Image (cartoon, grey):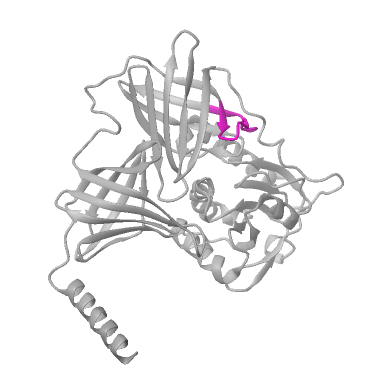
Amino acid sequence: MKHKVLIWGVLVYLSVAACSSGSPATVEPGKYRAVLKTQGGELPFGLDIQPVADKAGSYTVFALNGNERLKMDPATVQGDSIHIPMALFESELVAKIDGSTLRGEWRRRRTAQQLQSLPFEAELGVKYRFTPDEKTGGANLTGNWATDFESKSGNVDTTDAIGVFKQTGSRLTGTFLTTTGDYRYLDGNVVGDSLFMSSFDGGSHLYLFKAKYNPATKTINGGFWAGVSGYESWVAKLDPNAKLPDPASLTYLKPGAKTLKASFPEPNGNTVSLADPRFKGKVTIVQIMGSWCPNCMDETNFLSPWYKKNKSRGVEILGLSFERSPEMAVSGPKIDRMKQRFNIDYPVLLAGTNDKAQASQALPDLNAVVAFPTTIFIDKKGQVRHIHTGFSGPGTGMYYDKYVDEFNQLVDKLLAE
């Protein structure tokens, strides 16, 4: 046993010595064409990597999808590899530096025992998404598309979807709207009669779309790959009048209920209730959310600065976070990371797990929690006046602008009462 311990100690020493010898590698700054190798093929996205001034081995990194520059957490070089984390999603890109090329993998921790991964590569200076610009497509797919997704089991998605696309040359950008949220920023190309789009946000949205357009029927048929193993087929028909169900009709108070009861702990252990004095006589917005949820991230990115600007008017916001674990030791740090990333001033409580049935039990005044996020508007008397299911983020363009306008109009109305 002593000999085994001695040998192990020597191996550890040699490993540490090897890692610490020499100077760490450096990453060439600039924009990279990155790809994840999925079951559907290459999922491309952009990375902008820039060194942090006066901090050797540290880099600022943005993921590039359409018009979005999504800031990742600070990246560091360790030995011959760069580590690009996204703590909110418990994920990271780890790649060996080889000149202007990065090769490695994307990793995401799903549970304490489950770690998902996909091969990753990135090359500096390559500007196209799926195909070089000179390979322009023939079809023009700009417009609204009524869409159905179908899983491997053959079950058609009960949630209606609308594809909202804008094509310039061969480049295609847009998203899919659903009653529970949107697919955020999609970016890609049209090549002949084929569509290719993708998105990468570091964790939850690793999306790859491939499809063919039939000009005779004005329909698109294809496949949708999500994350490591998700797959759905989908079909879309051009429909400029496509609409979703009213987001105010999906979540509502049970008959006889007028208020919302909620009392849950903050990560610091302090219990906050809607009955507390800080909410009395104020217009209160309750945000049903989760740190794991990209659409919640988009909504928080709107609500956090909005609250700073408007809290003096007599409004409050309360976040109810439903996480993968009900244990504060596990989920509390995730809530704190989200509060820090988005500079949230309002309280965010751990309300339970993100299982929708359990979330519904945690808020028994509601018919159900059907989407993360869901936003509840409460008037000065403490009565629920409006519930909005889902969130159309900035990737939806005019739909996001419409939501912001309606949000402000409703709050102004409640404040004036």
Residue in the image at 49% along x and 46% along y: 298
Q: Is residue 23 magenta?
A: no
Tell me where the magenta segment starts and ends, as one range: 148-162
User: Toward the viewer: 267 or 202?
Assistant: 202
Q: Residue at x 72, y 52 (%)?
A: 360
Query: Horizontal placement of 190 versus 372: left or right?
Result: left
The N terminus appears in which quarter of the rendering?
bottom left
Quadrant assignment for the C terminus: top right
Q: Is residue 138 above or below residue 282?
A: above
Tell me where residue 75 sits by quadrant.
Answer: bottom left
- Horizontal and vertical percent position of residue 336: 51, 65
As drawn, which residue projects farthest toward the top? 216
- The picture places residue 248, in percent across and down from the top left corner, at 69, 37
| Residue at (62% x, 63% y) in the render | 350
Compared to residue 22, the image places residue 412 above or below, namely above
Tell whether 157 sits left or right of 65: right
**Picture quadrant of residue 165:** top left
